[in-house]
Image: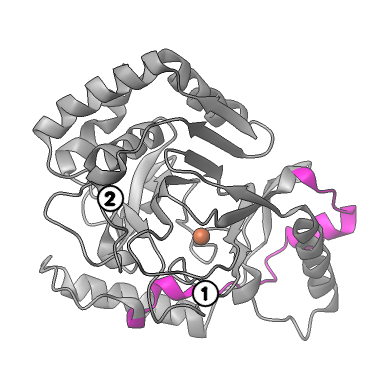
Amino acid sequence: MNQLTLTDDEIRLIKTILAGLESRYRSAEDSEFLRYAGFYAHDLPRRVRAFLHDFKSTELPSGMMLISGYPIDDEKIGRTPKHWKYRSDVSPALAEEMLLILFGSLLGEPLGWATQQDGHIIHDVVPIRGHEHEQLGSSSQELLTWHTEDAFHQHRCDYLGMMCLRNEQRVATNVASIDAIELEPLEVKTLFESRFTIRPDESHLKKNKSDVNNNTGMDNQLEIAYERVSRMQTDPEKVAVLFGDPQSPYMRLDPYFMHRLDDDEQGQAALDAFISKLENQIHDLVLQGGDFVFMDNYRVVHGRQPFAAKYDGRDRWLKRINLARDLRKSRSVRVTAESRVVY
Ligand SMILES: [Fe+2]
């Protein structure tokens, strides 16, 4: 794991930058803030910028990086929300959300999904009562099976960024990198072929839309987006699990949402071998308040260990963003060139 711990001087500089931004913007999803985030990020401490730059440009081994040591004001952020849909006018974690966006902007462009968390760019990952046994970030008692984020979608993120506001129960995220495993040549060849299907995960389904009326004026578009997800569920296209360079491949998979290939013994055998090799490398990563983790979504899979949520305002609370290296690739499913929401 590539890790950087912020020094006192770096934290002071970061806080000065954030204080200035907080006086100008009421939301880290403000379109002007998002437009200039990559520019504001130039003011971040040089060592942090170099660290993120190296991670992006050299594809550092392990495919993950951690920036730790940012102090969280526990009183200021308040209680862990009961649901991601409950958002106050101004987020109590505005500064932390802005910092997540600033760090992320050095890797890519923040991007959200119309069909996930009501189109918000910054997601709250909190346990939700009633979701205990779902395959959702808001579940708790069930193992959240490891996966590529939004593996089913061609516009899935290049990087997944998460910051931890609190995790008193030390709930473990689990992770594995493709760098840690070795595949046989036939397995590589087979996994590079379009013979697998990956259905959308539950977080994109209409049943998980909130009942909050966001009044975005995009209801038609949203319906079309849900229909698209629904088609991907009933009639998923065949895709390759590996892509890029066969010597050092990228991956996309979400075993829980992949059908068994009853009529393709070779494909299923290669997939089983791949899954079991990754499974053997899965290890825990316990995020602490003030940790920022960035995962290369082409090279790392992630999940979460089961835990008993308390719903007492002190449960594990993460903020999550998706980052695309090239926003243009999703232009056909975004409303304007600058818009950050994939429909
Ligand atoms: Fe995930």
Residue 82, compared with residue 176, is above or below; it is below
Verify whether residue 31 appears in magenta.
no
Of the pair 172 and 246, the residue shown nearer to us: 172
Residue 282: quadrant of the picture: bottom right
Residue of label 2: 340
Position in image of residue 234 (x %, y %): 50, 85
Q: How many marks on residues?
A: 2
From where the camera sits, is residue 257 visible? yes
If the image is split into quadrants, where does the N terminus sit? top right
The first of marks 2 and 1 along the sequence is 1
> For the point 59% across and 75% down, which residue is it?
257
Magenta residue span: 180-207
> Looking at the image, do the residues carrying marks 2 and 1 touch, with CB atoms under 8 Å apart?
no
Amino acid, disc 1 = Gln
> For the point 81% across and 58% down, which residue is it?
277
Position in image of residue 89 (x %, y %): 11, 54
Instruction: Answer with left or right where residue 228 lies relative to residue 144.
Output: left
**In the image, which is nearer the foreground, mark 2 or mark 1?**
1
What is the number of the mark on residue 135? 1
Instruction: Answer with left or right where residue 270 lies relative to residue 62.
Output: right
